Image (tube, coloured by chain):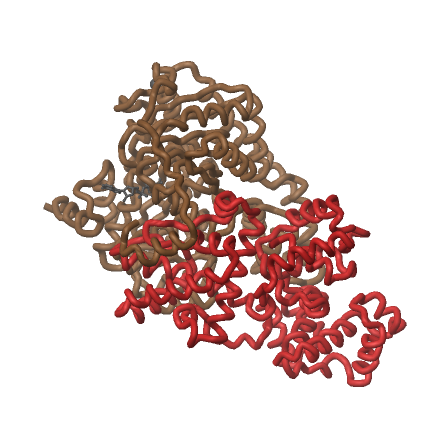
Chain colours: A red, B brown
Amino acid sequence: MFEYIILRCINNLKGERSLAGIYNLLAGKRSSQTLQDAYAYQLTGFFAIYKTLHRTELIPFLEGMSQSYKIKIKNDRPEITSYGEEELKRLEEKWEPLFFAGIHIQEHISVFEERLFLYIQTITNVKAGNHHFLPVSERPDILNWVKKTYKRNKMNLESHTIDMYKELHALLKAAHEEEADVFSHRITGAGRIGFSKQQLAVQFGLSVHDVHLLLQHSLHRFYQMAATKPEQWPALALFVKTVDDTGGLITNSAQKTYKLIKQGLDLESIVHIRGLKMSTIQDHVVEMALVMPDFPMFYFINDKEVNEINNTLQTLNTNKLKEIYDALEAKFDYFQIRLVQANRQHNQSGET
Amino acid sequence: MMSDKLENKLKRYFGFDTFNQGQKEIIRDVMAGEDTLGILPTGSGKSVCYQLPAMITDGITIVVSPLVSLMIDQVKELKANGYKQVTAINSFLSVSQKKQVFDQLSRYKLIYLSPEMLQNEMVIRRLKMLKVSFFVVDEAHCISQWGHEFRTDYLKLSAVIAELNHPTVLALSGTATPEVQEDIIKQLGLKRMKQHIYPMDKENISFVVERVENPDEKLRKISKTLQLQDAPAMIYFSSRNWAERASLELSSKMPEKRIAYYHGGMEQSDRLLIQQQFMNDQLDIICCTSAFGMGINKKNIRYIIHFHLPTQTESFIQEVGRAGRDGNHSISIVYYSPTDDYLPKKLIQSELPEPAHLKAVLDYLLSLYQTNAVLPSDEAVQEQLELSENQWRFFKYHFYRKGLLDNKKVVFNEMKWKEFYMLLKEKIEHRYYYKMARFSELLTWVHHRNCRREKLYQTFQDTVKPPVVPCCDQCGFHQHDFSFGESKNNTEQESWEERLNKIFLAGGQA
Ligand SMILES: Nc1ncnc2c1ncn2[C@@H]1O[C@H](COP(=O)(O)OP(=O)(O)OP(=O)(O)O)[C@@H](O)[C@H]1O
Ligand SMILES: [Mg+2]
Ligand SMILES: [Zn+2]
């Protein structure tokens, strides 16, 4: 699965982005550039599906792919070869349809995951008469949530457990055998502690990358099922976090910047107050333009300028900033271009 | 009469029938309001020495403990045993979680604190509003720079104790030489402390050192020793890489054994799972770095094997102390090859900042000063300057102490900075030589020709108890002729449906 996803990224990025671009996407580096790329190259599903990936693991993997002629690497930018395209088709047949929805749900996945595994550990242990066990999650918010939820359901623990079993069984039955193997062995229940990713890899003859992605995929799929059809998956719907309004913004840090902007401060003052670099603050602004409805563009650039940049974006039809910058004859700085680009992408994606 | 009552309480709260050596004596003094220093061997039950007084006395007990994971484990264990009035405050809590804890502070009787939290004025202010009966310093050797895990945060403890109006202080450590013991009392700023120092030798551990040529030979010997036995084992490595690599190689040498690795670089969820598998007897052998161990309270570990030596005797004793907590026979084996000398040296270097770092850090501060910026978060600084947590902590402490930093603002004065540079450079060199000397002390033990038990504990105490098991290789113990009994094969496989069935529907059958 890892290879498929990497090939898919390289294919979509058309040689316009470096290895770092792929890495930032998968690891979910929350820069505005990464978010913009995800939209521009139709890779939003993969955003942040591999947060624990190390850059140093990606390099040898790409080199391996290049040695087997699936990709070429020119100036640090990987490009797919025609042989790679064939391979991509084969892998697509094996893996698609995939249900990753990274950019939309990634911030909910880890909560969903920790609740799910701790809750299963809790109900199956209690059912086995075992009230003292060391929890598989240490986050106080998760522990509290599980405690409360368990209390609400303990009256009909037996049927509740069976419901949970039925839903998981049905979903795993519909998944790849590998995915079902990995997910079922990750679970901790009474008398059975779940496997680490490394152990799952050894047990099922997979790479650790594949194990990670198979698990993520189950979670993404379960989450979306439960979130969109709670009446069909009532047991799993328990774990879906009810909305807490973060304004749709992705980073905490960007939210702080946003508050200051709303107070009417200019970017220079914000740089001072927050002790961050100007480029970081600008990243926050681009991030807002990308995800916020009604983003006040006029704070930073007037309508005429927006139109001018927009026209150029349309004619050039590229995401390479340097080209756009040159075409506009350096009349605007990179920040303004990215801002307009982000706003455009936001409008095109039709999000609220 | 009083002691009789204490025993009942021990039974009631912990389910134990009798006190371990030293516990009652320490508890009595603490309850009588005496500042107390307790040195008890690892695994001998130091926690009970403050948990019991905390539970049966009015007011709250604050426990300062250096390792967040250790702290969390203890809280979990207490809660799992039904004691709810306990909580831990550390930097892992989010702002809202911290607020939640602070708003309900009076609900707790036992509060674990990580030392860096004591720098937080708000924390101190909140604590001052409570009635603090006992102030416990766990792993107290961290306060001494001669101890094996010096923590600069610990130096602030004396000020905090004074601010809290001097509650009764209990300082506990499992490994402290007389030199360190003296330093603990001095640094805590206490004039008189009742001292309960118990010998730290373990009567149920046999010691073995084997000299080999190279790492491969170590692996071969380890699998030869463990292959046919039913004996949980921990193998210590000095690097993450080695722990992983050895775990793979040992698995292929002993396919019937369940082997895994554990180190600080793993994802938190994987770490928890591996730790629980080991506790739950779902693993036979764990290949780990020193990140594992502290807080591991598995009773039936039979072998502690050192593939690599730690950097000093105290760490070695502490790691060996994981074995045989059930009181039954256990074995410590060190595999030593001549090239090993070089690894701890590297470790020591990585723990200490280098003079080159010093320059980089000062340059960085200067640039902050020039742009009138405040000091960013610890993580940000560490990343920017590529320093380890320990290294940055060391610098920060001295910056504040010498007035180069004040409330996150840089204070510049050329003369003062020059002086500071020379001073710190010297300090760093000093510590480096000190640590190297401690390492060669441990090497001396490895090369020792007489009883290993006597030599190992020599700097801590005058005599050792006669062991209740074979003593050591020098005293005639041959580990090759020894076995804890036949091993069984535990590696069965389940299909995904079987596993799901067993977990959800087996009706309690493990
Ligand atoms: N009186 C007792 N009788 C039986 N078991 C005890 C007694 N006191 C403590 N124990 C058990 O001994 C084990 C070790 O206790 P504890 O963790 O407090 O040791 P420690 O001295 O703090 O060790 P370390 O040096 O590793 O921190 C625990 O499992 C504890 O429950
Ligand atoms: Mg302890
Ligand atoms: Zn001996």
Residue occupying image coordinates x 76% and y 54%: A78
Residue in the image at 48% along x and 40% along y: B261
Q: Where is residue B96 in the image (x, y as percent from the top left)?
A: 45, 68
Query: Would you say B255 lies left or right of A314 here?
Result: left
Q: How many labels does the image show?
A: 0
- Residue placed most toward the observer, B492 or B70: B492
Identity of the residue drawn at 49% across and 62% down:
A174
Whether residue A124 can be seen here: yes
Quarter of image, ligand 1: top left
Relative side of A138 to B371, left or right? left
Instruction: Name the spot of residue A183 as percent of width and height, x first.
Output: 47, 55
Residue B187 drawn above or below residue A76: above
x then y, percent, for residue B435: 52, 32
Check the image and report above or below for B107 versus A182: below
From the image, which quarter does the N terminus of chain B lie in? top left
The quarter of the displayed image where residue B409 is located: bottom right
Left or right: residue A30 versus residue B205 is right
Pinpoint residue B119: horizontal percent, then vertical percent. Answer: 47, 56
